[in-house]
Each structure stands twice: as structure tokens, then as C-alpha cells.
Image (cartoon, rainbow, N blue to C red):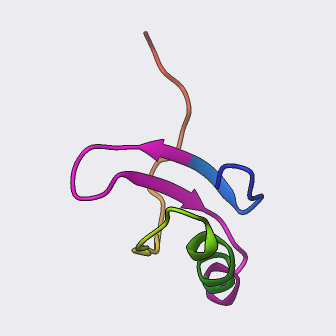
Amino acid sequence: MANLPEIQEVHIIAGDWDMIAKVREKDVEGLGKAVLDKIREIKGVKETVSLIVFESIKETTFLNL
């Protein structure tokens, strides 16, 4: 999954799901194709849930450690 160019981030998480991936596409049609034609075809992927961001208030990679 991490090798797909549409996927920007992949994280193993705790909770209801095992993994979360950040997918960026130019439109909803592109997102649908990425999910249906690529991600769901990956061995081991049993289910997908898509959440669409309407607006990003803050997005950064800066950490003040």
C-alpha cells in the first residue's frame, strides 16, 4: 500500500481499525478509483472506510521536541 503514489501516509493504529492511510486525489472520482481498483485489491485488505476532508485548518510536520 505504501508504494501507491496516491497514498501520502500510512499509519498502524489502535482502535476500531488497524491502519489509516492518507490518500490525495484531484477529485472524488480519482479517490474512488484508488480505493476500489487499488487499495481494496491488496491482499489482506478486508474493508475500507473513506472519510473526506472538507477543509484543513492546520497541517504541519513541525515538532518542537
State the image coordinates of residue 44 (x, y, percent, origin top left).
Answer: 50, 62
Q: Is residue 53 above or below residue 2?
A: below
For residue 41, side relative to residue 51 (left or right)? right
The image quadrant where one finds the C terminus is top left
Residue 29: say if magenta.
yes
User: Toward which corner of the image does residue 29 lie, by quadrant?
Assistant: bottom right
Task: State whether residue 54 is above or below residue 13.
Answer: below
Asked if residue 12 is among those painted magenta in the image, a careful observer would answer: yes
Question: Residue 40 location in percent, x, y?
Answer: 56, 75
Q: Residue furthest front?
A: 43
At x 74% / y 58%, what residue is drawn? 4
44 or 20, which is in the foreground? 44
Q: Which residue ends up furthest to the left in the rendered image?
A: 15
Locate residue 62: give its quadrant: top right
- Residue 61: x %, y % from top left: 56, 32
Residue 2 sits above or below residue 65 on the image: below
Using the image as rendered, state which of residue 65 and residue 37 is in the foreground. Answer: 37
Q: Quadrant of the N terminus?
A: bottom right
Q: Residue at x 48, y 60 (%)?
A: 56
Q: x, y percentage for residue 15?
A: 22, 50
Magenta-drawn segment: 10-31
Q: Quadrant of residue 30?
A: bottom right
Tell me: 65 left or right of 28: left
Outermost residue toward the bottom in this view: 29
Name which residue lies at 44% across and 75% down.
Answer: 50
Task: Tally the numbered discs.
Answer: 0
